[in-house]
Amino acid sequence: MPGLASAVFTVEERLDTGLVWNKDSILYGTSLKRVVPRFTFAATPSAAYMRMADTIITLTGYDTLDFTLTPIYLTIRSQDRSTTKTYEIRATVHAADPDLYTWKQLTPAIYEPDDSEQRALELGNEFVLIKSNGFWRNVYRSEDGTTWEDLGVPDNLPEGTRVRQIISKGDTLYYGQGNRLYISTDAVHWEEKTMNYPIVTMLLYWNERVWALIENNGYQFAFLNNGQLDTTALRPTSDFPISDFGTVTFESASLRERAMIIGGFAEDGRSLNTRWNLEYSTHPLPDGAYRLEEFSIDRPAFTSLTGISVIWYNNQLQLFGGVDDKMSYFGREIFISVDEGLNWTKADSTKNQLPEVYQARQKQTAIVRNNTIYLFGGQDGKNTYSDVYKGRLNSIDWPKTNN
């Protein structure tokens, strides 16, 4: 039985009854009803027998025992029959399924429903949520995602602010519109700066840099450096999104810093099925250390989608929400990719499923903090949500073993 065969037991010598136990629990679901124990002794005993409930069994090496009948004791008699030693045997099986995700709703609503667009971000040790309907805006703050404080109206953000294009560097927020960049450390007070290039959209924070898509005789990738935008050699095609795309950053299997930009709307309003891969190499290529590749050219079997959220969690990509080019919602399913975005499949719903109260939607925000997934808000064709959920893989913090 694999779960038992790989278990490591520790022997504790004590003055009275010793203890034999497994420090790391045996694989979840392993049955202890029919166990054939194997013991190795430093010296050959004259006898060894086990006692459980009212039964005493002399060990032969081929005995099938029920280890659920606790307590269980092993007694060993020395070869000269002069001494005996008894040990309690404890075999512990994981009570929690390591592959199960536990989801719960933290709050049904941060604010009363309205038609605003929203964006949740991590700012320092807190979450902030900024909502806007294009004319008026509001900011909320929370330490745990459950209790929220209304911080009021942010100052100095322009009319028409697309809050879903605000990005976080961890301790600072950034929003770009035209030749203006807006910066805040508290989500309420924003500083305005004039930029050297017009910003089409803010992209993401990655590789310790704030990235934007700029207009410079066509689209071009740029990053903030000393308060202005440094251009790169990266120029995406017209099939590059300018709104409602999903972004994610992670370290690849080859230990390279990677980012992905998935789906979204092109400038002409088309819903895209693109998966753009941005990669950094410490061994620069002829056109620089950064490389941009469009996966969908070689792998077109990927639906057009907008309003998604993507995270890197448990060494895989997980995708939440969104709609296709016919405005059909993807439902409550979670999509995963175990090969860094090349292929996607639905997550096992018996292991990873959002709560029943969670409604299919788009434009939600997904954030990973302290190995926990947080989902914020979103909207469907009729409703705008400001609810919050958190999910966590049972084994995400369990010690890694070499078994």
Image (cartoon, rainbow, N blue to C red):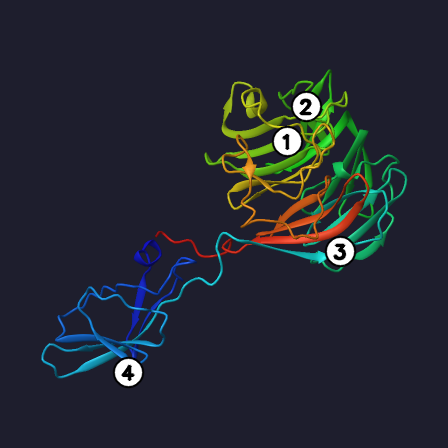
**Is 11 on the left or on the right of 318, as rendered?**
left
Q: Earlier in the sequence, mark 1 or mark 2?
A: 2
**In the figure, is residue 294 to the left or right of 400?**
right
Label 3 crowding class (10 Å Cα cut-off): few <14, some 14-19, many 20+?
some
Q: Nearer the viewer, mark 3 or mark 1?
A: 3
Pointers 1 and 2 in contact (CB under 8 A)? yes
State the separation of the CA atoms marked 3 and 1.
30 Å
Q: Amino acid at mark 2?
A: Phe
Q: Which residue is mark 1?
A: 261
- Mark 2 is surrounded, within 10 Å at the Cα level, by few (under 14), some (14 to 19) or many (20 or more) other residues, namely many
Q: Nearer the viewer, mark 3 or mark 2?
A: 3
User: Which residue is denoted by mark 2 in the rendering?
Assistant: 240
Which label's residue is closer to the chain start, 4 or 2?
4
Going from N to C along the chain, the mark reached first, 1 or 4, is: 4
User: Closer to the N terminus: mark 3 or mark 2?
Assistant: 3
Q: Which kind of residue does numbered mark 1 sit on?
A: Ile
Secondary structure beneath disc 2?
loop
- Which residue is the site of mark 3? 108
Residue under label 4, please give it: 15
